[in-house]
Image (cartoon, rainbow, N blue to C red):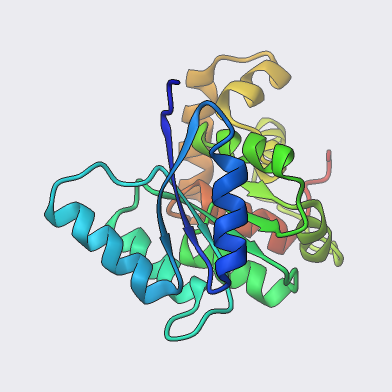
Amino acid sequence: MNRNIKIMIVDDDPMVLDSLKLVLEKKEDMVVVATAGNGNEAIGIVDKYQNEQKELPDVILMDIRMPNMDGIEATGQLKKKAPEIRIMMLTTFEDEHNIRRALRAGAEGYLIKSTEISSMAEKIRALLSGSVILDQKALEELTKPKEKIIKSLSPREQDIIRLVGRGYSNKEIAAELFISEGTVRNNLSVILEKLHLRDRTQLVVYYLSNGQPDNS
């Protein structure tokens, strides 16, 4: 089997760890390389991997509420240590406050634990392709009030930020708008500069916080 997606699962419930590991490893392209019971343990594992020059996990599935160090604090620290690791929050809580905190900490995804495993595997693959993944319930929680409009962007830029906010990758945006991936990347750079944002994740947070463009 060609297993090329390395996953770490962080959760204080041993049953969750075991069940997720068992099911995800049935996917031919996935392997769970590590598990941890809280944020401190997860950081310790990543530190050990870096010290031993071992390949880091590609994706971390991170619970939020855990003892010693919660998942959001751990996410913030891990993104500083190893920004290349993609972090997907995996929780039973879809409240707006935690969602925004997680995204601001650097998480690229937010899934509810009731998500079907088959769908979860697809979302993990999409996360690695560069998409920002939000569970539908979490998205609904974030998009309840929609009064403000992003007015500083051109129509093309509004189209791009709308699709980024919906989780599209650059390739998917290019196909949707009939433009090249290079044009998408150039426009994204301009958008980030205009809005004084650092990266794609911050752009998603900004989009969800400030409302959809006029032409959405």
Relative to 30, is 20 on the left or the right? right
Q: Residue at x 62, y 54 (%)?
A: 19
Quarter of the image holding residue 214?
A: top right
Q: Is residue 216 visible?
A: yes
Q: Residue at x 53, y 52 (%)?
A: 201
Q: Is residue 162 visible?
A: no
Q: Residue placed farthest to the bottom in the image?
A: 68
Relative to 39, is 63 on the left or the right? right
Relative to 176, is 88 on the left or the right? left
Quarter of the image holding residue 100?
A: bottom right
Q: Residue at x 64, y 46 (%)?
A: 133
Q: Residue at x 62, y 43 (%)?
A: 23
x and y percentages locating residue 123 in the rendered image: 64, 39
Q: Nearer the viewer, residue 25 or 207?
A: 25
Q: Nearer the viewer, residue 118 or 106?
A: 118
x and y percentages locating residue 78 in the rendered image: 35, 63
Is 177 located above or below residue 24 in the figure? above
